[in-house]
Image (cartoon, rainbow, N blue to C red):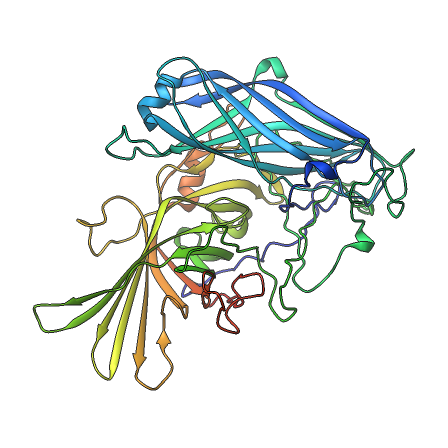
Amino acid sequence: MRGPGPTPRPSRVRARGAAIAAFVALAPLLPAAAVAVGTLKVDTSLPYVCTLPSGQQSATVRITAAFPDRAAPGEEIKATDVTTTVELPAAADLRASLGSAVRAETRLTVDVAQNEQRAQATWSGTAQSLDVPAEGPLVLTTTGDVPALTTDTTGDLTLTAAGLALDLAPGTTGDAPTAPASLSVTCVPGQDAGGRTLLATVPVGAGTREPSTPPPSPSAPSASPSSRPSSPSGRTVPVMPGTAAGPVPKAPRNGQQADRGRGPTVTEEDTPGTPAARPAAPPCVTEKPTPTSLAAYITGYSNVRKLNGANIIPVSCVLIEQGEPVFDPRPDGSFHLLTPSTGHLSYQGRKQTPPFKATFLTFDFAPATATMVLEQIGTMTVDSDVLLVFPDNLSETYIRARFVLRVLDVRVNGTRLDVGPDCRTEKPLGSPEPDPAKYPGDHLVLLGKGQLINGTDATGYLLTGGGPLTGEVTIPAFKGCGAGGENLDRLLTASISGPGNYIKQIQGQTCAVGVEVPTEGQCTEDRQPYVVPKPER
């Protein structure tokens, strides 16, 4: 990173409001047979308002899940059999936008509360491709992993449905000659729901069994903090408020110590088979690997020129499908080896980075901290070109991807600035494109250069070996920022948006996921990248 100015601290546990620590991470669903006898069934239909291409429409969201009907302090509380069914009334409108088939992903924000403590979690789900009816409603049902909860204090733990994000993409169909663009739909609880809807209340403490006592059924016992495995790879990730409806905890009075009881949290379990020497990193798993599947971690810095500073982009997982190499002789007598590949970021089942924080001095005097994510749209292309010149082989790799910068939370001088649930750049980030005729539109471009000298180690960047990738990015104007009638678009645009922002990313060595016996030192036992890179300026 070339730019001066303060750099942000990495994401870590922070005090929120009454100084409670709130964490979130994915936890696998328990099988249905593992649900204890004392089970609280949830099956509720909620009124929502969704913003579709034709405008705001009323929709019905049905949520089903099963919770334990009680828990002891420190005992895991896992929701099982979770489904989210969304009934959208304007199927014809969506058919015009997406085609005759559609795939869906949902992200339901769930507010978790206990006594004066608050946290947020995201329930993610996916659906298989289904036909869009020519008339009548479109009904989408998604399933997926949800966070597991723990709390060290007693009292009723409540879970309340808040904002819902619905991502729609063209499905498998023979009717559409071209693939229409994807569509993101934002939904909020309707007025009939009072803006928020209670899903479940789980009593914690009085009248419950001790965590060490086996449950009165043959189901698998939940793990208490003392029984959970621990290793250097275990980690927790802060909850990042993402909806305007999210509760704001009360701040402690002056001189008053923070509440020592830890509120509702979610702990990410250690990755099985991860060597102790490997640094902590988000899961990076290829669900259905092929012989050409690669996985790698990437991290680095990005300047924000207007703020005269830089922010760190956290360690992120990228999954790549390597293409077939093509030998390309040129009219000038040179020989090139071209390898086209595709890929995408992967975080908790979504194509995005983990949430990251950036701290700057806005207008040169006001400290501001923003929590953001980079959300990928479409497919990432990775084009490697090796110029075969004996004894030196020169390599250039262009990585192109469309990313929208989404802002989840902003604090100025420690005071929360409510940006709402849908604050993001109005279009993807843009970079200077060396071949605009072949690659039109706004997208990020990163370039990695390497050299392979016969008989020696490679230097610079190679797709399989990793290395530095650099580029320049324009941050577009923001839209959808603000809540309660307050429009903050112009404020964020004036503070952040603009061209000439230098970016430097470091990719680690890839793991050949689909190889039967991966090369030692490249993959963990469960086929995740072994190398976790460190950001470089």
Residue 251 placement (x, y as % from top left)? 73, 39
292 displayed left or right of 241: left
Rendered view: 104 above or below 280:
above
Where's the C terminus, which quadrant? bottom left
Rendered view: 471 above or below 418:
below
Rendered view: 157 above or below 412:
above
Residue 208 placement (x, y as % from top left)? 89, 36
Residue drawn where x is 36% and y is 78% of the image: 458
Q: Residue placed farthest to the bottom in the image?
A: 455
Judge whether residue 484 can be spotted in this image. Answer: no
Residue drawn where x is 28% and y is 31% of the image: 174
Which residue is at the front of the view, 418 or 380?
380
Where's the N terminus, which quadrant? bottom left
Residue drawn where x is 30% and y is 64% of the image: 397
Residue 241, quarter of picture: top right
Judge whether residue 2 can be spotted in this image. Answer: yes
